[in-house]
Image (spheres, rainbow, N blue to C red):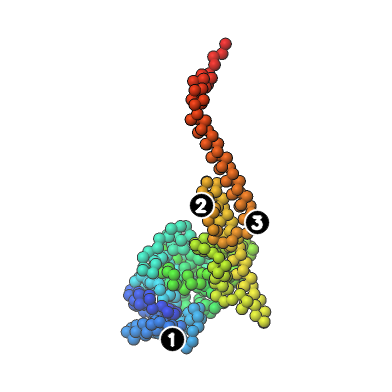
């Protein structure tokens, strides 16, 4: 029986799959099984997986009878696992050769832990390192500089309080198999892996290995990036907070504070997307709304059966979109006023990226007119002064002005 079961859910991953599998087969710890569940891929993923299964008896690959989806497919892998320890994996990530050996050693040397996590290196599609350029990125990739053990409660409370998932992605986690017997909660759209860690931490501690033992690939085709625009991804964090609300109570964070923090972040993220667009008309805003609704028409969420959950999703999407649009409008207005105050009218006369509300537009027009009149008066005054300085009378009376400007002696 293998000591470690590596679970790899697969869907259309042909581009990076060989590199991922080769990183597993290159491990210094060899007592493992690699379980590959292909979720009805339409590319050559299943053929690649079958090729490795025929080559190495530790690789077991199969294709599901029907497409299950991401977390159900993970659960299919977990059901087939027979190892004492469960190592999660993703089709585009990479293990360093010593990863399994160091994680198993952490379990064996530290009784009572149920999760081992490690530092990781972000890389792009070509495996070039992506540097951690700010404090949040450093926290995500290297939360601790030395090996660290903490209680499960402490790990959960810290991540909820900071609202940053520094516990990591599946590629950097190994679990005690008995601690995750319930598998993934399939209600989640994006952060089901964080919920799985929370599940394991109910019965044990977390051990963090400071060495970067894996590479996490960040690229436009990844499953993570694909899900970021969906409203369901945003609502995952609210669901997670509700599920583990007792930890919020222990650290003194109210439900309202927790929710408002994420709403603010979501609006900021949407506004940033708008800010990157060259033009944001009705069609572009409609696309964002459709993405937030899960790429469906908003009316489809208001069925004859009146599903409150679906209706909430649509209303939340509309509310988030409108808030982001308003914040974007205000930033545009601020930028135009700043340009006008510097005398740069090129920005002010350009077509705005989105139609500005009539009240704001009127106020901006008034400010623009006032600034233009001010600049005209200043220009006129400069012309008058220049003409005066060049006139004959001004030059003739210059000695007299100098005489009058001399300080007078007191009597």
Q: Is mark 3 on a helix, strand or loop?
A: helix
Counting from the top left corner in percent of width and height, residue 218 is at 43, 68
* Residue tagged 3: 359
Report if residue 111 is visible in the image. no
Q: How many angstroms separate mark 1 from mark 3 (CA)?
A: 59 Å
Image point 54% across, 68% down: which residue?
284
Q: Is residue 198 left or right of residue 95?
A: right
Q: Is residue 411 left or right of residue 10?
A: right
Q: Are dots 1 and 3 in contact, CB under 8 Å?
A: no
Mark 3, other Cα within 10 Å: few <14 / some 14–19 / many ≥20: few
Q: Distance between the residues labelled 3 and 2?
A: 22 Å
Q: Which numbered disc, 3 or 2, marks the residue that appears first in the sequence?
A: 2
- Mark 2 falls on what kind of element? helix
**Labels 3, 2: front one:** 2
Quarter holding the N terminus?
bottom left
Q: Where is residue 391 in the image (x, y as percent from the top left)?
A: 50, 29
Residue under circle 1?
63
Q: Residue under circle 2?
A: 346
Neighbours of disc 1 within 10 Å: few (<14), some (14-19), many (20+): some
- Do the residues under discs 1 and 2 have CB atoms within 8 angstroms? no
127 is higher (above) or lower (below) than 63: above
């Amino acid at each position: 029986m293998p000591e470690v079961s590596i679970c790899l859910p697969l869907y259309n991953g042909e581009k990076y799959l060989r590199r991922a599998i080769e990183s597993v087969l290159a491990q210094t710890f060899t007592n493992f099984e690699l379980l590959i569940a292909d979720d009805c891929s339409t590319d050559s993923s299943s053929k690649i997986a079958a090729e490795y299964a025929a080559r190495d008896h530790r690789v077991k690959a199969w294709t599901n009878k029907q497409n299950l989806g991401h977390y159900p497919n993970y659960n299919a892998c977990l059901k087939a696992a027979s190892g004492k320890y469960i190592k999660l994996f993703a089709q585009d990530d990479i293990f360093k050769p010593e990863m399994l050996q160091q994680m198993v050693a952490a379990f064996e040397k530290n009784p009572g832990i149920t999760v081992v996590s490690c530092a990781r290196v972000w890389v792009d599609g070509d495996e070039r390192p992506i540097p951690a350029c700010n404090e949040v990125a450093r926290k995500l990739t290297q939360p601790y500089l030395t090996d660290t053990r903490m209680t499960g409660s402490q790990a959960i409370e810290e991540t909820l309080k900071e609202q940053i998932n520094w516990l990591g992605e599946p590629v950097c986690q190994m679990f005690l198999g008995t601690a995750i017997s319930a598998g993934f909660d399939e209600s989640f759209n994006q952060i089901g892996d964080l919920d799985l860690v929370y599940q394991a931490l109910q019965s044990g501690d977390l051990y963090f290995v400071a060495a970067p033992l894996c590479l996490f690939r960040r690229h436009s085709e990844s499953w993570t990036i694909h899900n970021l625009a969906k409203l369901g991804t945003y609502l995952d964090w609210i669901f997670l907070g509700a599920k583990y609300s007792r930890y919020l109570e222990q650290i003194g964070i109210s439900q309202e504070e927790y929710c408002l923090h994420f709403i603010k972040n979501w609006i900021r993220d949407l506004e940033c997307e708008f800010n990157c667009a060259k033009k944001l008309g009705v069609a572009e805003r409609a696309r964002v709304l459709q993405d937030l609704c899960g790429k469906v028409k908003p009316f489809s969420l208001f069925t004859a059966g009146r599903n409150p959950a679906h209706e909430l999703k649509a209303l939340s999407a509309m509310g988030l979109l409108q808030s982001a649009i308003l914040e974007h409008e205000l930033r545009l207005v601020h930028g135009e006023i700043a340009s006008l105050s510097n005398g740069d009218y090129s920005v002010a006369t350009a077509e705005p990226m989105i139609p500005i509300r009539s009240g704001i537009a009127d106020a901006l027009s008034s400010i623009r007119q006032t600034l233009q009149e001010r600049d005209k008066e200043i220009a006129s005054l400069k012309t008058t002064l220049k003409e005066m300085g060049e006139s004959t009378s001004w030059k003739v009376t210059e000695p007299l002005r100098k005489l009058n400007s001399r300080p007078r002696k007191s009597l």
